[in-house]
Amino acid sequence: MSAAAVLFYVFAAMTVVAALGMVLNVRNTVASAMSLVVAMIALAGIYVILEAHLVAVIQILVYAGAIVVLFLFVVMLLNLRSDAFAVPRSRLVKLLGMVVTGWILWVFVRLLPGSLPAVKALPEGFGGFRDVGRELFTSFVLPFEVTSFLLLAAIVGAVVLAKRRID
Amino acid sequence: MPEIGVIIKVLFMVLVVMAALLPVITWVERKQSALMQDRIGANRADIAGITVIGLLHPLADVLKLLSKEDVVPAGANRVMHLIAPVLALVPAIIILAAIPFGGVYDFGSGPVSLVAADLDWGMLYILAAGSIATYGTVLAGWSSNSNWGLLGSLRGSAQMISYEVTMGLSIVGIFMVFNTLKLQEMAQAQDATFHLLGFLETFGWISHLPSWLSWLQVPMWGVVLQPLGFVMFLTCIMAENKRPPFDVPEGESEIVAGYHMEYSGMRFGLFYTAEFLEVPVIGTIVTTLFLGGWAIPFLSTQDIIGGLIPVFGVGAATGLCLILQVLTFFLKVIFMIWLQMQIRWTLPRFRYDQVMDLCWKIMLPLSLANIFVTGLAILLIQEAGR
């Protein structure tokens, strides 16, 4: 096995274990969030193996380094106790949930192969900040700018909502 | 064997910064505070009566911290409490991997670049590693089951996230000027000089500069090309470090000791080490981005090697150049450490709303304006050059 393959299996195992840790730690919100961080860092490792360096570093910088910190910030502000999520559910609700989840999974698996867009072969070594940046600001400039407007709208909306509470 | 080269570079960088600079910095901190406050400062720790002007105090500190009891408070989240100090310290150490402490030298068997990890996205790596350090602060306060600790963590996480945004934006200008994210290439680009009024020639306003203005030839350092970026980046990265005047997460007069108040012994020592280690690490980052890295002002690498070859021959001349430039790099780092100490003991702590206002209302708009003006200038110079 090549070094890249060994690293892939290590990071893949880390991702799966951390993702399971995130889902299974529902009662302990902070441990769940920290598992999410580990999953994201492991995913970034896989991106590096795939030579998608920009995605890897943004994954750590933005998701692991900023967004999950904000999750933790909210968790600490609300000071959630471990029983906050223990909502009593009846057997029927649980059964219904399983059926709906299974149905969605089945639809997803059936539609997936046909609905993926045709993958364009990328030039050798693509994935650095220079290539991705050039693509973003030439071929995909409209989606890029629309996304930033969407984010701006979300920020303004959040400020308006928060300010109403304070006033 | 390239692996051995990498190991040697890592060992060199870590040994110089952690084993040589770090203990001396704790001593300098004491002596400088004493100087500023008209005291004598640390001078009592001795071995058989020899005090070596107080230089034994770092050793005494470590011995004291190691021999103290490691207390985990009742009701604390044990795992998170034990992890938090490590998360605070590790990012500061791994950042050193991407810092070029010397140039690229050819000893006949291919170029040797004096940086452990010569990444194309080196600066982004540093920002990403730094962003992980926030977890140390957040988890420390939350896991100790203490209200003061929690308040310190809340302050710390909000402050660090806010300043990360401005820190990233304040160096976009540097990326644009040097047209790279690779730190070795940035340092190499600064190994040159340019004329402060050279743009008059570029735009064709005057045909050639008069010779009596030749003293305006300056090193092409980041601090000359991006003075506003330098001030903003230094401010942001000092706020990330959480030392005074940005130490609101610790704020002794308000929240006792903030996020690490429930820590004792060497676990507190790790927070203390992280805070002090960040001072030379900040020095290396700022030196590489803004102070020319390993470049000697007015003496480019070609000049040095070219001048030394007739005397020493090719191999020895390259080796001497390497030693000179590595020494230059660490001299600049020591200057940055001195500057940070000076700021730390000159300014009192900001109020928390002042810290936030400085970030969001003053530096964020300024950094955006800096990007716009830099882009405009680069565009105009490129157009004029055609």
Image: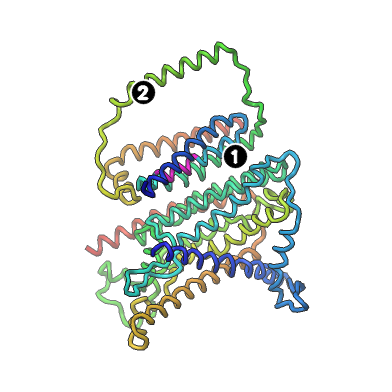
Q: Which residues are magenta?
A: A39-46
Compare marks 1 and 2 and give the one earlier in the sequence.
1
A140 and A117: which is toward the camera: A117
What amino acid is at disc 2? Val
Q: Residue B147, position in %: x, y?
A: 72, 42
Q: Residue B28, position in %: x, y?
A: 65, 70
Helix or strand or loop: what does disc 2 sit on? helix
Give the left or right position of residue B31, taking residue B302 as reference. Answer: right
B285 and B262: which is toward the camera: B262
Do discs 1 and 2 share a chain? yes
What is the distance, in whole Å, between disc 1 and disc 2 at their CAs? Answer: 36 Å
Q: Main secondary structure of the magenta part?
A: helix
Q: Which residue is mark 2?
A: A109
Indicate whether B22 appears above or below B139: below
Indicate whether B177 appears above or below A18: below
Q: Which residue is mark 1?
A: A73
